[in-house]
Image (tube, rainbow, N blue to C red):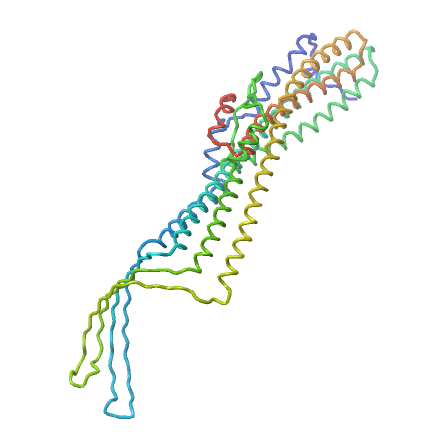
Amino acid sequence: MPKLAPSLVPHRPAARILRLPAALLLGTLAGVAGVAHAQSLQSLLEAAQSYDAAYLAAKAQFEANRAKAEQARARVLPSVGLSAEAFVNRRDSSASVLDDTFNNQTVRLAATQPLYRPGNQLEVEQAQRSLQAAEAQLQSVEQDLIVRLSQAYFDVLGAEDTLTFVRAQKAAVEQQLAAAQRNFEVGTATITDTREAQARFDLVVAQEIAAENDLRVKKLALDQLVGRSGTQPWRLPTPVTLPTLAPNDVNAWVQRAAAEHPSVRAAQAALDVTRLEVRKAEAAKGPTLDAVAQYQFARAPSSVAAIPGYLRNQTASIGVQFNLPLYSGGALDNRVKETVALEDKARNDVEGAVRGVSQATRAAFFGVQSGLGQVRALEAAEASSQSALEANQLGYQVGVRINIDVLNAQSQLYQTKAQLAKARYDVLVGNLRLRQAAGVLKPEDLQPINALLQAR
């Protein structure tokens, strides 16, 4: 078994060995941060809002729906049109004296104002409801972006913490390996201690390689989301007071979700559209009345023998047009039946949306509750694991504990630290997921979380 270089196995008192991991944690975090400038959660959200394809597509769709609503509004406003005609005509007659080639021109200006068209007004109301549904959809996509960004943000922090703890464990195992080798050389320990420490050291090296790659992948995911390279999130300092549930009542969250969730509001808007469609289908069976005004200028050859050459005629007219469908082969009646069935479908869609968001809200609420309990339990486990490690190290020095006991205690401590860090991040993201499940998540909700973070 090759020996470690003397510089790697200096003799240190137990107290200094116990203090080393804390210093290593800070050093590793500084190394992970590198020279990149750290960004807050809110600043990265602003970057993601100007880069994320799904969010930009939803914004474009909303603008398209806004324009469509204006198109529907035009159906109740006057329409004015200008038309012109010019023809060259050839007339061949059985009486050759009438054979002729001539041209005629016509210019027509016409205006129409709907006076009684209930279907047009219903289309305007439908467009307004559709715009509300599009706005709800945009809000849903924005909430999804906030959660996706926060998850990617804390995934990077979690990967950094994992790498930090693995490196600290590696340093501790390295010291334990050096101590086992020294004890073997002086005859106070068996070769088994050295081999156990070497095996644990090799395992931690493999874990370090995996942690480095995981951090690299997590950073790439965050970079891609915000459209930047070298993003570096702010850290979450410890100890930290995590936000609690407010209100701490699942029924209050469920009631809010049923009233405010974007998917429920979109489904309700769709139901309103189908109800208006029923009324529009019924209105299509009734009469319509339009005001029509027209001015026409025409130039054509005279048809009166006594008046040779071309005549110019100007005609102005104003009046009303009445239309009433009498028979359509049953199309209008079946259209009404179709819209009634679609209204029933939309009503069930609303009920399904309410049930879905209620279930998701309950799951998110209890997830946050569970996460807060896990954080408290892991904080206690961290303190216990630290005490257990110190006791095993002291026991190893006096000969009542063996090397594997110390190695196991070290592994348990750093695993607990990593689990605790992840649990804290999960609680923060879980709070956002709860607000998303209730449909009330807004960009401003990142401010309390951002206040907990600390620039590097």
Percent of width and height locating residue 285? 44, 60
Q: Residue sitting at 73 percent across and 12 percent down?
A: 388
Residue nearer the viewer, 32 or 344: 344
Q: Nearer the viewer, residue 218 or 261?
A: 261
Task: Tell me if residue 404 comes above or below residue 331 in the rendering.
Answer: above
Question: Exactly how many numbered labels are in the figure?
Answer: 0
Where 240 sits versus 337, above or below? Answer: above
Decide which of 167, 440 is in the foreground and name it: 440
The image quadrant of residue 257 is top right
Query: Eyeballing the image, is 239 above or below 153?
Result: above
Q: Going 70% across and 26% down the picture, which residue do you hit?
A: 205
Residue at figure coordinates x 60%, y 23% from the top left: 424
Q: Could you tell me residue 256's position as x and y percent?
A: 53, 31
Q: Can residue 170 be seen in this view?
A: no
Q: Is residue 189 left or right of residue 50?
A: right
> Which quadrant of the structure image shows residue 131?
top left
Image coords of residue 74 (percent x, y):
35, 53
Is residue 403 something one can see in this rendering?
Answer: yes
Horizontally, residue 181 falls left or right of residue 223, namely: right
Query: Is 131 on the left-hand or right-hand side of 9?
Result: left
In this picture, is 167 found above or below 125?
A: above
Quadrant of the drawing holding the N terminus? top right
- Image coordinates of residue 109 in percent, x first then y, are 26, 64
